Image: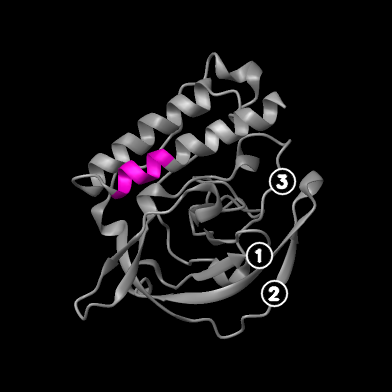
Amino acid sequence: MSDALALAGWRREVAALYARIRGADDPQSGWRDWCETRNRLFGEHPASPIPAARRANYAGIPVYPYDPALRFACAIVPAIDPQSFTVEIGRDGAIAMHPVGRTDGLTQRLGGELTLFWIEGYGGGLFAPFRDATCCDETGGGGETYGGGRYLLDTIKGADLGDDLGANGDKRLILDFNFAYHPSCAHAPDWVCPLAPLDNHLPNAVRGGERL
């Protein structure tokens, strides 16, 4: 019971954090709030993914400096193959998801585009994990971020920067890589998280957001 209430409290605080970010005067001030709030949650909250024995001496989450060039208002085009697939997530069983769209506007800076997934089941939600050239791998490359990648968008957990209007009045999804964060499994082996599929492996280094 206490674990469930703690997790509910965590999600409530994260949802409130992203609501503040969407309403911030400028993206960088929202990012500073994001860094400060996540450091507090990770170091103090009972539902933190940081093991309890490490929280007292937890120094905070390392992040890259804020880079305004890593914020995009992306057009989303339909997914080519919207078929569902299943991802095993350890003791939590499995989750089903399917592609719903593909970004259009990241290639020039990041070398590729990202697929957006819809997590199926009760309520559902948008999900955008990714890997890039900063990720540590089996060959010894990268090493700046977790080998399994990071998350950019996970609306089930409240991680959502919203959208904006393009020049033609079309809605564009805000994807700001300064807010990219590691999944819980990067912090402790007790967690099993869905990782970025091949579709979402970016060839360039994305030095924004959380790092190791």
Q: Earlier in the sequence, mark 2 or mark 3?
A: 2
Q: Which residue is mark 1?
A: 120
Which dot, 2 or 3, sits closer to the camera?
2
Which dot, 1 or 2, sits closer to the camera?
1
Could you give the CA–CA distance between mark 1 and mark 2, rounded to whole angstroms?
9 Å
In this rendering, would 208 be left or right of 194? left
User: Which segment did they paint magenta?
Assistant: 16-22
Q: Secondary structure at mark 2?
A: loop
Could you give the CA–CA distance between mark 3 and mark 1, rounded to whole angstroms?
18 Å
Q: Residue at x 64, y 55 (%)?
A: 139
Q: Secondary structure at mark 3?
A: loop
Q: Which residue is nearer to you in this view: 14 or 53?
A: 14
Q: Is residue 98 magenta?
A: no
**Residue 7, placed above or below residue 139:** above
Residue 184's disc is: none
Q: Are marks 3 and 1 in contact (CB under 8 Å)?
A: no
Could you give the CA–CA distance between mark 2 and mark 3, rounded to whole angstroms?
20 Å
Q: Which residue is nearer to you in this view: 188 or 122?
A: 122
Q: Are marks 2 and 3 in contact (CB under 8 Å)?
A: no
Q: Which residue is mark 2?
A: 84
Q: Earlier in the sequence, mark 1 or mark 2?
A: 2
Colour scheme employed for the rendering of this structure:
one colour
Point out residue 7 in the picture as x, y percentages from the top left corner: 61, 33
Residue 192's disc is: 3
Q: Earlier in the sequence, mark 3 or mark 1?
A: 1
